[in-house]
């Protein structure tokens, strides 16, 4: 990158670290470190949690998914709209969880179930979360190396180090410093500032792409040039897209409902708002928050695909393709055993001539044109696999992840290259800090604290939290350094997440809404879901080198193939299990779905069999006689023909006129535009299918024109709202009275800071 680009990257980061250091003096108690003192307003929650939730790894994952499978499948995401809107407006799970005043999910579990379940659940949750997070540094560091064109090795003081390790160490250290300074306070403040700074920067990148490429002349024709049943734009022509298809969408819909709030990567934000209403309104604002961010990600993916596949950019594409291939080869094939392969590959890239050795290592069909994307990728993958199968798989994963980043460096001009790099570093830091804080807090609060039984001093607990958070960073560093990823990022998320998510959803939803849920039911759901997920991970990692060869050697392959492929046959083409030597037949998303369904069934069934008495929900939610001093009692209208819509929109006595306008705007936009257009187009195409060119125009309107109009408004709106709310946050932190009992401990299903109040009201009733 140019010096101008590096300056654009550096200046905002200096500001952020300065603010983080200034904010650390507000941390005076455990609740400050874990939940920012529970004093955040809706805009801070919305802006900061949005920045933390969309990490750099998420951007890379979306690039990978869009490039491989296009945008047609995202049309079916509109199936989520009514469910997602209803959950957001009613505060489904979010509102009740904030009412519990729990700072971690484990604290809620002990209040609702038992201390044993808190420890057991936190063990699975932290294992799932830490391993899931552990590839974040790898993907982020590799993105920066490829995008910024950094060398794979760096010489320091006469020693040669892998640049990959140095970049990871640099940003993980920066994240640990930010978290250690003030926990959730510094995380939320820095994320909010990064979010506000990002809004105009997203707009700059969007404008640069629209200047570089013509939609009708460059982008649309390239996206339309696809084989039948593999359309990038037509959602009714995607039958051959195996990994990202309708089944993937339906699993996501099921997970949206039954695993609400289950993923705790940003758990500090779930308890950070000043009250349950502000927590809910922060989520409602999330409908408008994304602005130019979503538009930018879509445009960059389209631009990358266009550069690599449009004849007008053939020279740039050839340069990017060879650069990507050679860099990925050197990244993966470092050992001497690959020297011969690398020599022949280099000769082929330079001359186009296929040596006798290279012809033996790879299929002849891949040598047709080294300037084509897939043949070159597959040829190199096979050549590396001839020496080591796992290296071929790792090359394929890295190649697919870094394809769009490399293309973007050949697209964006000086200045804008630095702007996008700065945005990516913002996302990298915000997610690293948030996830480290979340998983480290769970280990301390939900495993070590309840096992110890007696309280720490505030100083001891804060020191332990900082130490464990640094340990999470250390684990992520070494895991990323040595782990070879062989699956799509989104698929890796699904299977590692399933260790926890397979059975966590019913424990949370049932715990918040169903009085009859029991600890035994929760134990059963989590155990079954975790077992299935771990089994899936082991099978996926050992299939190529151990399981498949063993099945061949023992003559069991044909029987296993018949059973597995026969089970998926009724669900084809959406679930298509094929027993092949290079990949486990059941993908990560399918394993995740199986684990979730079994978890729900076991939670309900075992709870009904073991229920002895119904749980006191009012006490846990601080309602009725258990309402805390200073909190307003919330009233709801009786549901009638005239007032049903208020219940549907989540409107209650806490809503101001502005809140009602916000709720109605979300409803009208989501239902009339988002879901309404989906219904109309689905019916229309069922009667008279659209030509692909119409879908190209619809894509432009739905993903670029309308979001662009909204983004102009939301950029100004959230920049002002976030800045004002940030000032209020500091004022509330100054005025807040500390309660040292509010440290995450639970006594007899009641938080330690509520025990005296509960004893008093129960004695008086």
Image (tube, grey):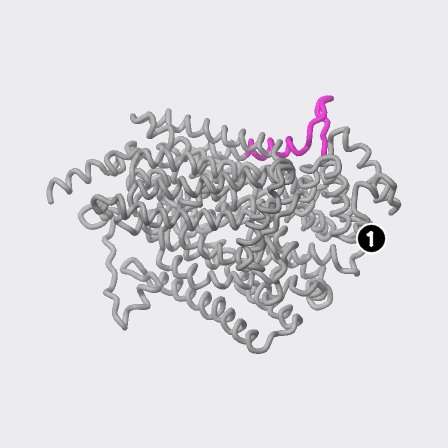
Say whether residue 30 is visible: yes
**Whole-percent x and y of residue 478?**
58, 30
Label 1 residue SS: loop
What range is drawn magenta here?
152-174
Q: Quadrant of residue 2?
A: top right
Left or right side of 373 for 659 = left
Left or right side of 147 for 77 = left
**Whole-percent x and y of residue 547?**
60, 38
Q: Is residue 174 above or below residue 296?
A: above
Q: Residue at x 50, y 35 (%)?
A: 178
Name the foreground residue: 307 vs 185.
Answer: 307
Magenta stretch: residue 172 in it? Answer: yes
Q: Residue at x 77, y 33 (%)?
A: 338
Report the residue marked by disc 1.
Answer: 369
Magenta stretch: residue 361 in it? Answer: no
**Whole-percent x and y of residue 104?**
37, 39
């Amino acid at each position: 990158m140019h010096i101008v680009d590096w300056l654009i990257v550096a200046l905002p980061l200096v500001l952020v670290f300065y603010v983080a250091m200034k904010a650390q003096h507000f941390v005076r108690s455990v609740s400050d470190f874990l939940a920012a003192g529970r004093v955040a307003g809706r805009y801070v929650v919305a802006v900061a949690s949005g920045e933390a939730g969309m990490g750099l790894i998420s951007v890379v994952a979306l690039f990978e998914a869009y490039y491989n499978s296009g945008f047609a499948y995202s049309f079916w995401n509109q199936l989520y709209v009514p469910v997602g809107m209803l959950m957001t407006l009613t505060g489904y799970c979010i509102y009740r969880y904030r009412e519990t005043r729990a700072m971690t999910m484990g604290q809620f579990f002990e209040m609702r179930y038992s201390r044993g379940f808190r420890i057991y659940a936190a063990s699975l949750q932290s294992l799932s979360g830490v391993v899931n997070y552990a590839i974040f540094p790898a993907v982020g560091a590799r993105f920066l190396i490829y995008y910024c064109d950094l060398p794979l090795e760096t010489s320091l003081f006469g020693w040669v180090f892998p640049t990959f390790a140095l970049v990871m160490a640099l940003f993980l250290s920066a994240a640990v410093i930010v978290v250690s300074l003030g926990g959730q306070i510094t995380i939320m403040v820095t994320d909010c500032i990064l979010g506000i700074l990002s809004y105009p920067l997203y707009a700059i990148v969007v404008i640069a792409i629209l200047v570089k490429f013509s939609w009708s002349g460059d982008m649309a024709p390239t996206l339309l040039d696809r084989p039948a049943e593999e359309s990038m734009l037509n959602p009714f022509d995607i039958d051959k897209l195996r990994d990202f298809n309708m089944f993937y969408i339906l699993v996501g819909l099921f997970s949206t409902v039954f695993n609400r709030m289950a993923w705790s990567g940003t758990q500090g934000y779930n308890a950070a708002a000043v009250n349950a209403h502000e927590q809910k309104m922060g989520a409602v604002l999330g409908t408008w928050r994304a602005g130019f961010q979503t538009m930018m990600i879509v445009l960059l993916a389209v631009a990358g695909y266009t550069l690599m596949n449009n004849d007008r950019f053939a020279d740039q594409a050839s340069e990017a393709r060879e650069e990507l291939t050679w860099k990925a080869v050197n990244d993966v094939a470092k050992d001497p055993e690959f020297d011969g392969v690398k020599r022949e590959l280099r000769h082929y890239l330079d001359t186009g001539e296929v040596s006798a050795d290279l012809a033996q290592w790879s299929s002849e069909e891949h040598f047709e044109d080294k300037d084509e994307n897939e043949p070159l990728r597959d040829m190199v993958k096979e050549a590396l696999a001839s020496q080591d199968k796992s290296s071929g798989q790792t090359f394929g994963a890295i190649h697919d992840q870094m394809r769009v980043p490399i293309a973007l460096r050949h697209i964006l001009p000086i200045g804008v290259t630095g702007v996008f790099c700065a945005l990516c570093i913002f996302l990298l830091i915000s997610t690293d800090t948030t996830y480290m804080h979340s998983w480290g807090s769970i280990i301390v609060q939900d495993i070590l604290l309840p096992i110890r039984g007696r309280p720490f001093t505030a100083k001891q607990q804060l020191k332990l939290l900082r130490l464990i958070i640094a340990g999470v960073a250390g684990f992520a560093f070494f895991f990323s350094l040595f782990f070879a990823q062989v699956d799509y990022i989104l698929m890796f998320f699904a299977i590692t997440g399933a260790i926890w998510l397979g059975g966590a959803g019913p424990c949370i939803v049932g715990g918040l809404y169903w009085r009859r849920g029991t600890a035994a039911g929760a134990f059963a759901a989590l155990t079954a879901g975790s077992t299935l997920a771990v089994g899936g991970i082991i099978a996926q990692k050992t299939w190529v080198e151990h399981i498949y060869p063993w099945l061949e050697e023992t003559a069991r392959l044909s029987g296993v193939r018949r059973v597995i492929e026969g089970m998926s046959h009724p669900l084809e083409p959406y679930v298509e299990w094929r027993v092949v030597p290079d990949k486990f037949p059941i993908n990560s998303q399918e394993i995740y779905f199986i684990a979730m369904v079994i978890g729900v069934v076991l939670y309900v069934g075992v709870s009904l069999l073991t229920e002895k008495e119904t749980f006191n929900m009012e006490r846990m939610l601080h309602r009725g006689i258990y309402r805390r001093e200073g909190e307003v009692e919330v009233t709801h209208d009786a549901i009638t023909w005239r007032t049903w819509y208020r219940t549907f929109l989540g409107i209650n006595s806490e809503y101001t006129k502005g809140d009602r306008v916000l709720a109605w705007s979300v409803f009208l936009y989501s239902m009339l535009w988002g879901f309404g257009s989906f219904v109309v187009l689905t019916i229309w195409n069922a009667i008279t299918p659209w030509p692909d060119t119409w879908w190209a125009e619809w894509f432009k309107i739905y993903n670029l024109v309308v979001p662009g109009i909204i983004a102009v408004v939301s950029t100004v709106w959230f920049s002002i709202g976030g800045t004002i709310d940030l000032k209020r946050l500091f004022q509330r932190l100054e005025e807040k009275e500390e309660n040292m009992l509010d440290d995450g401990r639970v006594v007899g299903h009641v938080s330690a800071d509520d025990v005296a109040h509960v004893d008093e009201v129960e004695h008086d009733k």
